[in-house]
Amino acid sequence: MTAEIILQQSADDLALLERREKLAAVRTQLATRESELAQLRAQLKAFEGRYMRQVGILYAELDEIEARIVEREADLYNSDAARQRAEEARQRAQQSHDAAFGDAREAEEFDPPPNLKTLFRELAKRIHPDFARDNAEQKFFTMLMARANQAYSRGDIETLQRLLDDHREIHASVAGETRSAELLRITRQIQHAERDINNLEAERHALLASEVAQLHLDTEAAAREHRDLLTELATGVREQIADAQRRFDLIDRQISAHGR
């Protein structure tokens, strides 16, 4: 073996070692970002549920009364414009009702379609931690299975398919691969992990910019001042409900006076 070949092998070995270290680092970063995002999702989901129970259902009640008011006005004035306003108000009331009560109903009625189940089972056969070849891969597969489970619970076929496609591409040829082939495979793994990190970061920014996240921040700021913002909001909506009910009773009496 010539000195040139030995030097080349040494360079290849060093490059492979650097790629392996890079892969370990980005996988650790990916796992951290995934964990942080899962916590953020859970935190905002729990807060949204609390908001809906305390305030959202009251807005649904308010919009229902407002819709009934406009519908009674349509009965009173009997015009196309009044009927159009009544239809729009009823749609808003339905949207408020679905927002306040839809999540619980969807959770009860969630029945994954067959293609989602098939895709999830196919993916699980490949990335289940029990099939890992070493401790590092076991940790990585554990993270992938967590992502797959979350995607399955959301009915997210796109994410499940991407996880499966990534696995197929990366593990297309492993047994007996050359040093250069292994270097290429690890490079692809790094690229996929960095892409996923960017996607998670984009989702995190979108969540933090959402109305729910802003309301959550406002609620925490109010709590530091010993105020319960959701209770304050609920009190305000109850006052609006009482006012709307008075307006409904008034127009109902007007209609009765006209014999309608």
Image (spheres, rainbow, N blue to C red):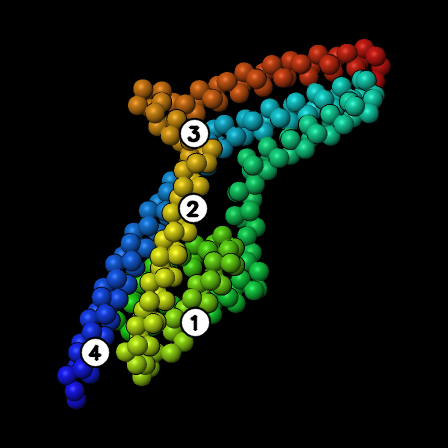
Q: How many marks?
A: 4
Which label number is shown at residue 215?
Answer: 3
Residue 130 coordinates in the image, percent (x, y): 32, 70
Mark 1 or mark 4: name the one nearer the start of the chain.
Answer: 4
Q: Earlier in the sequence, mark 4 or mark 3?
A: 4
Q: Residue furthest bottom?
A: 1
Q: Nearer the viewer, mark 3 or mark 1?
A: 1
Q: Is residue 59 left or right of residue 121?
A: right
User: Which quadrant, please, contains the N terminus?
Assistant: bottom left
Residue topped by disc 1: 168
N-terminal label among 3 and 1:
1
Image quadrant where one finds the C terminus: top right
Name the amino acid type tagged 3. Leu
The mark found on residue 8 in the picture is: 4
Q: Secondary structure at mark 2?
A: helix
Q: Label 1's element? A: helix
Measured in 3D between alpha carbons, the distance from the residue under mark 1 to the one under mark 4, in whole angstroms, is: 30 Å
Q: Residue 9 in the image: x percent, y percent?
A: 20, 79
Residue under numbered circle 2: 203
Camera-nearest residue between 185 and 33? 185
Upstream in the sequence, badge 1 or badge 2? Answer: 1
Which residue is situated farthest in the left direction here? 3
Q: CA distance from mark 4 to mark 3?
A: 59 Å
The alpha-carbon separation of the residues under discs 1 and 2 comes to 25 Å
The residue depicted at 53 percent of the width and 19 percent of the height is 238
